[in-house]
Amino acid sequence: QKSCEKYPELLIEDKNYSIALHYRKNPDLENHAINIMQQISSNYPQLKLNKGKFVIELIPNQADKGKAIKTILNHLNLPSVLPIFIGDDLTDESGFVFINQQSGLTIKVGSGQTQAKYRLKDIDNVANFLFLFQNKIKSLYVKNSQNQNGEKICLN
């Protein structure tokens, strides 16, 4: 906090196990944000720097979205699953790599280089995609039919 006093546009986010320093209010402060976090990281060898979109984070060395997704999928132990991962940040790239290895669906939101197989322009397109996806799933797995008396029944 003391290091950021000179730069009121910097936003410190305490994430319990990590800390993020956002500079989206003033992208010109990127180098200052990186320098501040590098100075702090020298006192915490168990943490690593992780650069995102207008943010620099100090996260545990073992932290990685790909590893986190793998842990979750292993815990769920589903017999058949199609993992879908949507992300908009550099920190999402390890998640894209892992999901691609699982033959899942990876979607990058916005511009920039990516390991994702697909791309959506913005959050509005994500909302539209999810709405269409939900409707498609409903049409595939929820079938309407009629019983012998002509009453509609719903089969799941």
Image: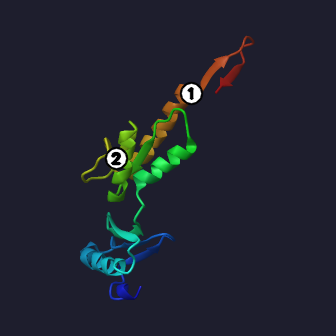
Residue lying at the far top in this picture: please name it: 148
Circle 1 residue: 141
| Horizontal and vertical percent position of residue 101 | 36, 40
Q: Nearer the viewer, residue 116 or 130?
A: 116
Q: Amino acid at mark 1?
A: Tyr
Residue lying at the far front in this picture: please name it: 45
Residue at 33 percent of width and 84 percent of height:
7
| Horizontal and vertical percent position of residue 111 | 27, 53
Q: Estimate how packed mark 2 is, as few (under 14), some (14 to 19) or many (20 or more) residues with alpha carbons within 10 Å.
A: some
Q: Quadrant of the N terminus?
A: bottom left
Using the numbered discs, state the Cα–Cα distance from disc 1 to disc 2 in whole angstroms.
Answer: 29 Å
Q: Is residue 50 above or below residue 154?
A: below
Dot 1: element: helix
Residue at 38 percent of width and 74 percent of height:
45
Residue at 35 percent of width and 86 percent of height:
3
| Horizontal and vertical percent position of residue 54 | 32, 67
| Horizontal and vertical percent position of residue 113 | 24, 52
Q: Is residue 52 above or below residue 41?
A: above
Circle 2 residue: 97
Residue at 51 percent of width and 37 percent of height:
134
Where on the picture, by quarter, is residue 57? bottom left
